[in-house]
Amino acid sequence: MSTKSLAGVNVDVNEEGYLTDASQWTKEVALAIASEEGIELTDQHFEVIDYIRNKVAGGEALTIRGINKSGVVDAKTFYQLFPGAPLKKATKIAGVPKPVSCI
Amino acid sequence: MENEKKYPLKKILLICSKANLEDVYAALVMANGAVMEGIETKLFFTFFGLDAITTKRMNKLHTATVGNPGMRMPGGLPFPTMLAGLPGVESGVTAMMKKEMEKLDMPPVDEFLELIEAGGGEIYACKLAADMFKLEKDDMHPSVKAIITVGDLYAMCDGEGTQIVFT
């Protein structure tokens, strides 16, 4: 674990860059992580991020199927919003732990 | 060894040749997982694996109760082969498997294929097997991109960091 300066504040991150304290997350931190990942966040990104943060706060597991059924975005749009490894990137930007599910 | 260069997987071709519920899901889970990691993914169905992309069969796959030494009764005792062959046992076991899979949020086959397709994964059927089973593209799920030959399949293996997995 280490401390990293994002958007002018110090946050605790693990070796993969995921926030270890969800309470340190702000929209500005999200923007900073996203730009490191090469993503420019739009309102639609933030809708997905809100959904993910609510799910995780409720103790529910994140899956691509769940996102597809969320009513926030479908799977195809989700892949377009967070290209490459969508769930990994989206959780990183949302300041929640990396999902451990295989699906 | 610390400085050994790593070569991350860039492209994977998964071949599914069986219609058992668990064999099909192994291929689907691996394909979906690869797509979600940003790995270019192609999923190729051949022989009995074609059941998994044949519209009228895909959501009715069974788990084999006979000839499956991994089968256990609830509680962990081995499942006697004599019992496994009785009428209705395979359906019952399959229903139980599907219930457990649903608990883990594993989608039905058609939905799983759609998720893989949504992530840019490509799904193909084997021409030889399709000819043998008298199947046309219209018999198959819309996520199936094409019916291709084994030569076409190998042609897709260009580029470094490509692996083929046969399940």
Image: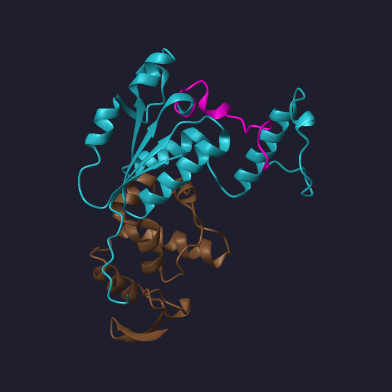
Q: Is residue B44 above or below residue B12?
A: above
Question: Residue at coordinates 61% horizontally, 44% vertically from top-left?
Answer: B101
Towards the viewer: A34 or B85: B85
Question: Residue at coordinates 24% horizontally, 69% vertically from top-left?
Answer: A35
- Left or right: residue B31 versus residue B18 is left
Towards the viewer: B24 or A69: B24
Magenta segment? B50-70
Which chain is cyan in the rendering? B
Q: Is residue B1 above or below residue B24?
A: below
State the image coordinates of residue B116 (x, y, percent, origin top left).
Answer: 39, 42
Q: Main secondary structure of the magenta part?
A: loop
**Chain A on-screen colour:** brown
Residue A50 image-quadrant placement = bottom left
State the image coordinates of residue A21 (x, y, percent, origin top left).
Answer: 47, 79
Q: Quadrant of the N terminus of chain B?
A: bottom left
- Left or right: residue B60 versus residue A87 is right
Towards the viewer: A47 or B154: B154
Total numbered labels? 0
- Single out the residue that lies furthest toward the front: B1
State the image coordinates of residue B107 (x, y, percent, origin top left).
Answer: 53, 41
